[in-house]
Every structure is written in C-alpha cells, then in structure tokens.
Amino acid sequence: MFKKKIATLPDGRTYEPSVGKLPRSLQPSAMSRTITHVVMILVVIYSLFPLLWIIFSTTKSNTNLYDSAPFWFANKNSFVDNYNALIGWSEGYYWRWIFNSIFYSVTAGVVGTFISVCAGYGLAKFKFRGSTAIQVLIMAGLLLPVALLTIPLYMVMHYLGLTDTPWAVIIPSCVSPFGVFLGQMYAATSVPDELLEAARIDGAGEFRTFFTMVLRLLAPAMVTIFLFIFVATWNNFLLPLMMIRSTALKPITQGLYGMLSYFDPVYGAVIQGAMFGIIPLIVIFLALQRFWQAGLAAGSVKG
C-alpha cells in the first residue's frame, strides 16, 4: 500500500506536504490530466496531418496522388521529376520568387514594425488634439478586410507610377492597424511614465529616450508585430496579383497560382513548390519563438 509522505516542522508538528508546485486542493485530478493529454495529442496529430500529407505528396505523380496511400512516399524518381517540372515550368524563376517573397516580407516587416511602435508609443504616451479620433480610425482599420482596399491601393500606386515595382507590394504592407494597436497597448503597459520623466530630467531628448530606452522595453512587442506583418505579407495574394505583372518580380504565392491555373498542371510539382515556400516561415518562427512567447506572456500579465 502507498505510504503517505509526512514532513516535520522544527517545533515537532507533522504535516503532509503538497505534491508538485500547487497546493493539494488546487492540483488537477488524474482524470483531468489524462483528458488534457489526450486532447493535446489529438490536436498535435490534427495539426501535423496536412504537413505530413504535403511531404508525402511531393514524391508522387498525378496518378499516384489518387491511387496510392496518402500518407506514404511513392518513389524518389517522382520527387526529382516533380522538382524538374517545377523549375522547368517556372523557367528557372522559382527560387527568384522565393527570394522576392522573403525580400517583400522582411522589408515590410522591419519598416512596418518601426512605424507601428513609433505610432503606438506616441498615442500611448502623448496627449494631443485629435488623438482619440486617430485611435478610432485605427480601430476601424482593424475591421476593414484587406481585399476591400486593394483596388484603391492599385489606383494610388498607378497614379504614382509604382505599379509593377517592388514598392507597390512593400509600401501598402508596411501599414498595419493591428501593429499600431498592439504597439500602443505594449507602450501603455510596459513603458513606465516615471522612466520617461527621469530621462527628461537628466536632459535626454525625446528621440534619444525613444531609441535608447523605449525600443528596448518594446522589443517583445516588436517581435510579435514583425511576425504578424511578415506572415501577412508572405501570404498576401490579391495585392501582388493586382500590382505585379513582371515574372521576375512575382512572389511565391502568385507564381504557384500561375502554375496551378496552367492546363493539366503537375500537382506534385505545385505541392513541392508550396512545401519549399513554407520553409522560410518555419525557420523564422522557430528563430523568434522565444522572443514571441516572452512578448505575449508579458502583455498578458501587464495588460
């Protein structure tokens, strides 16, 4: 029979210590832990199934996709054939499309993050006429679908002569109402007013205070905003479709769409292109995961 563990206090009194980090009264039951583990395992399996299917499908021809086991490889020759079909159909532009997507997303992410934290910090720490109206407009921008703004953006870029250039994709992607909102929330909760007042008393100007102290405090928020803008720019399809005509300037989303709309496409090649296309997203999420999780945790506690 299981023997209960008994601890003794310095004065001689005994007690039964709690197991784990929580008091015994707050510890979940064995049934709750079991159900939680089962649910989490099912969620992981459900999340991995599409990725596994993509990996297996890259080795299959059009016929193998329908008559072979969905979660197993076909043969290595089909993988090479699909890659050759991918490079051949794109006329060697496939990896250029990957580079274009990385360039658009990184540039928009860096510039958009800086704009968002600057605007968010200004709205959070400075009171001026019209600040409330600006916040209302930002909240309204969160409710507008991105597709609704594509035609007006195209007209503006066409008027400026920027269509069919990288700027036609980068400039609209740098503006993120959600990034400004998130930057404002972080600045309001993570930047103490006392710190700003101390810096001003010491003679530091607003720009020096912002670049030497505030940006460091907003680093977790900047990582979160960067990831959101990066992923949104990478996955954006309608904006490049309207703005870009040159094959050399296409992002990966537009390039794969052209291949998929081609008569009798090689689906294994398209799936292989999609698999290579998500590798940069996986790499950047894994690289920034620690900072992103720290930023979300800080925001949830301080908010």
Image (spheres, grey):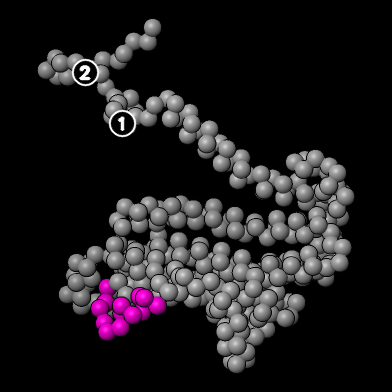
Circle 2 residues within 10 Å: few <14, some 14–19, many ≥20:
few
Relative to 274, does residue 237 appear above or below in the rendering? below
Quarter occupied by the C terminus? bottom left
Which residue is at 26% across, 77% downward? 126
Residue 160 coordinates in the image, percent (x, y): 59, 92
> Would you say 269 lies left or right of 300 here?
right
Magenta stretch: dominant SS? helix
Q: Nearer the viewer, residue 107 or 22?
A: 22
Circle 1 residues within 10 Å: few <14, some 14–19, many ≥20:
few
Relative to 174, does residue 36 appear above or below in the rendering? above
Which quadrant of the view contains residue 192? bottom left
> Would you say 114 lies left or right of 277 here?
left
Q: Nearer the viewer, residue 91 or 144?
A: 144
| Residue at mark 1 | 26
Residue lying furthest left in this view?
11
Which residue is at 56% across, 63% downward? 231
Tell me where the magenta segment starts and ends, as one range: 125-137
Which residue is at 80% across, 55% downward? 268
Relative to 157, does residue 235 appear above or below in the rendering? above
* Amino acid, disc 2: Tyr
Q: Which mark is residue 15?
A: 2
Which quadrant of the view contains residue 104? bottom right
* Amino acid, disc 1: Leu
Residue 10 coordinates in the image, percent (x, y): 14, 19
Residue 161 coordinates in the image, percent (x, y): 62, 91
Q: Which mark is residue 116?
A: none
Residue 212 can be seen, yes or no: no
**Sequence-earlier tag: 2 or 1:** 2
